[in-house]
Image (cartoon, rainbow, N blue to C red):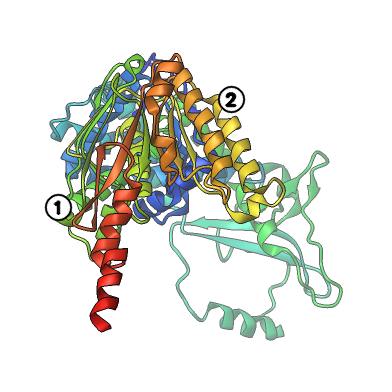
């Protein structure tokens, strides 16, 4: 198994082709709203959105994702343990960035290489223990467990863990360094060297005070540079012992490290010089440790770094799914049909945004209050002209269908009682544009331009969602273009919901179905009104604009008969 090719988003050896949602679809489907319901962490927001908006219609890949997500949803312990793993992977990601820093000293490169390998071994051990304890079913997680077992049982893995422990203990034994600093005649630091490396830290809080007192007492000034009475001398570099105290050596000319001083204040970049000194004094130790690590150069945690976005994606969606189900909303695993069939069968579908708002407390809404609908795309109808009253739920159901497709094809449970679909290759939306975007072309011109762009990219496997498209002040103009648009949809063979107030668009559809050759039959669908109230239920029927108005008029007593009767009663 090639570890570098492993993914929880696609089986190994399967080439995944994706299309990216355009900015209009991202906005119209409220992708940012959805992502913000999952996490507030900027890194997580970016990686989740990136995975979500790239769509594949590969049936094998989608089934693979559905099974992996089901394991994440069914096993809270898996999510708990892998959440802890994410913290370790985050550390590895930061170390990887640091390793690219060419300014880092060889000592810090060593320390971070040790940290990297320690994090790697911790990750392997943690993943193995977790996956061994849980009865996972998905191909993706089963293969991950197999891969981890292979790494763990590799002859070098146990050795690596032992070497890291030993090397870290050597490094961690260094608690303090005693330095000697040569001064010029103005007491400015000139050169610096290491007196000793110690296994104990300096803890006397009066150290600085005693130094100042010592320096101010001329009688206690040490003559010469013999410090043997205080401690053993450790030169920075064997080649510099002739300089007495020892100095840091840099550059090809082996010049003494000098400090750039301010003539007025005596300020100097002391910390940078000390870093170079410490690195130099430990160079031999560093080289020895590096040679020990070289045999593990092939071992890396980067394989698991590539899984970090995918693990985050599954965990956050599973957490949200738990909250939604706790509120009584139904979620179901999608059944994936052949892409070429272009079919969809949804039972009890609803808009995920309603459930998210209920979870967040934004709406005083119970699951039983949410209207659920059935919808099918098949040989009987693949294009629906959806009409109904204002605030009758047309936009809500249109968006619900797009979100259901997107979630299902990402492997996530769908807001429906059941959901069977042939995957789409992309989702194209055409919702009302911002007024600022219509200045140059006018609304009708801008909407026509966007529709043309959609048709230039769409295929028979695409999903189109149109919301009040071409609803200009001049109804006849919009209706003229809209009729040609649905003819083109039938000819292309897409699946579509076109919700509109142009009731005439949904009339005489048989003329189009019979007159235009195509594999997507057009049908009229309406949102219902019962007893003068909006029911938010959708059903196949001719447009009922007049009957809607009559129901509302009768309810509120604004028919001619009602008003005449009221006038007559007052006469």
| Numbered label attached to residue 418 | none
The N terminus appears in which quarter of the rendering? top left
Provide residue 73's location: percent of width, then percent of height: 20, 40
Q: Which residue is mark 2?
A: 456
> Which residue sits furthest right?
263
Q: Nearer the viewer, residue 175 or 321?
A: 321
Q: Is residue 241 visible?
A: yes
Residue 336 relative to residue 382: left or right: left
Q: Position of residue 419 (x, y in %)?
A: 23, 32
List x then y, in percent, for residue 237: 67, 45
| SS assignment at label 2 | helix
User: Number of marks in the image?
Assistant: 2
Q: Residue 123 or 224: which is nearer the viewer?
A: 123
Nearer-N-terminus badge (1/2): 1
Query: Mark 1 — residue?
Result: 328
Figure quadrant of residue 556: bottom left
What residue is drawn where x is 80% and y is 38%?
Answer: 252
Residue shown at the point (43%, 23%) measured from the top left = 512
Q: Eyeballing the image, is 365 above or below 310?
A: below
The image quadrant of residue 454 is top right
Between residue 335 and residue 273, name the one nearer to us.
335
User: Mark 1, mark 2: which one is toward the viewer?
Assistant: 2
Relative horizontal placement of residue 264, taking residue 146 as reference (left or right): right
Label 2 crowd bin: few (<14), some (14–19), many (20+), radius 10 Å: few
In this orientation, which residue lies closer to the viewer: 3 or 350? 350
Quarter of the rendering containing residue 209: bottom right
Residue drawn at x 29%, y 55% is: 550
Please tell me how crowded label 1 is: few (under 14), some (14-19), or many (20+) other residues with Cα within 10 Å: few
Disc 1 from disc 2: Cα separation: 42 Å
Quadrant in the picture for the C terminus: bottom left
Up the image or down, 369 lies above or below 15; here it is below
Residue name at image x 60 percent, y 37 percent: 448
């Amino acid at each position: 198994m090639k570890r570098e090719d492993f993914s929880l988003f696609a089986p190994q050896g399967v080439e995944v082709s994706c299309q990216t949602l355009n900015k209009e679809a991202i906005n119209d489907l409220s992708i940012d709203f959805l992502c913000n319901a999952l996490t507030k962490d900027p890194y997580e927001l970016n990686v989740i959105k990136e995975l979500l908006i790239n769509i594949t219609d590969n049936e094998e890949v989608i089934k693979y994702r559905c099974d992996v997500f089901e394991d994440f949803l069914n096993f809270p312990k898996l999510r708990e343990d892998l959440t802890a793993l994410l913290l370790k992977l985050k550390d590895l990601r930061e170390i990887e960035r640091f390793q690219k820093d060419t300014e880092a000293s060889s000592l810090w490169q060593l320390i971070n290489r040790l940290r990297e390998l320690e994090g790697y071994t911790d990750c392997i051990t943690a993943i193995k223990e977790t996956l061994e304890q849980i009865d996972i079913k998905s191909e993706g997680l089963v293969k991950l467990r197999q891969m981890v077992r292979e790494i763990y049982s590799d002859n070098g893995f146990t050795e690596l863990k032992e070497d890291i422990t030993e090397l870290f203990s050597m490094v961690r034994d260094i608690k303090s360094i005693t330095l000697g600093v040569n001064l010029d005649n103005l007491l400015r630091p000139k050169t610096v060297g290491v007196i000793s490396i110690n296994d104990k830290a300096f803890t006397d809080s009066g150290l600085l005070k005693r130094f100042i007192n010592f320096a101010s007492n001329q009688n206690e000034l040490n003559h010469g540079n013999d410090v043997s009475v205080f401690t053993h001398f450790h030169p920075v570099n064997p080649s510099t012992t002739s300089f007495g105290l020892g100095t840091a050596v840099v550059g090809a000319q082996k010049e003494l490290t000098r400090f750039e001083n301010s003539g007025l204040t005596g300020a100097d970049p002391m910390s940078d010089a000390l870093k170079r000194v410490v690195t130099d004094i430990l160079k031999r130790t560093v080289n020895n440790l590096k040679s020990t690590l070289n045999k593990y150069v092939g071992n890396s945690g980067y394989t698991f770094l590539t899984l970090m976005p995918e693990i985050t994606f599954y965990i956050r969606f599973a957490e949200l799914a738990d909250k939604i189900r706790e509120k009584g909303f139904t979620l179901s695993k999608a059944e994936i049909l052949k892409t070429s069939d272009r079919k969809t069968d949804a039972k009890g579908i609803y808009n995920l945004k309603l459930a998210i708002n209920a979870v967040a407390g934004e709406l005083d809404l119970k699951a039983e209050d949410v209207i659920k609908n059935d919808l099918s795309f098949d040989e009987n109808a693949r294009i629906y002209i959806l009409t109904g009253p204002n605030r009758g739920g047309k936009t809500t159901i249109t968006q619900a269908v797009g979100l259901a497709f997107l979630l299902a094809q990402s492997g996530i449970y769908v807001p429906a009682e059941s959901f069977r679909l042939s995957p789409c290759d992309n989702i194209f939306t055409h919702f009302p544009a911002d007024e600022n975007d219509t200045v140059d072309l006018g609304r009708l011109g801008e909407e026509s331009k966007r529709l043309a762009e959609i048709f230039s990219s769409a295929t028979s496997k695409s999903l189109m969602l149109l919301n009040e498209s071409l609803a200009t002040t001049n109804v006849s103009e919009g209706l003229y273009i809209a009729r040609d648009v649905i003819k083109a949809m039938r000819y292309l063979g897409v699946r579509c919901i076109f919700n509109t107030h142009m009731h005439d668009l949904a009339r005489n559809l048989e003329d189009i179905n019979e007159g235009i050759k195509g594999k997507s039959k057009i049908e009229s669908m309406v949102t219902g009104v019962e007893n003068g109230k909006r029911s938010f239920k959708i059903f196949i029927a001719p447009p009922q604009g007049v009957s809607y108005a009559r129901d509302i008029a009768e309810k509120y007593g604004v028919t001619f008969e009602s008003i005449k009767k009221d006038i007559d009663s007052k006469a």
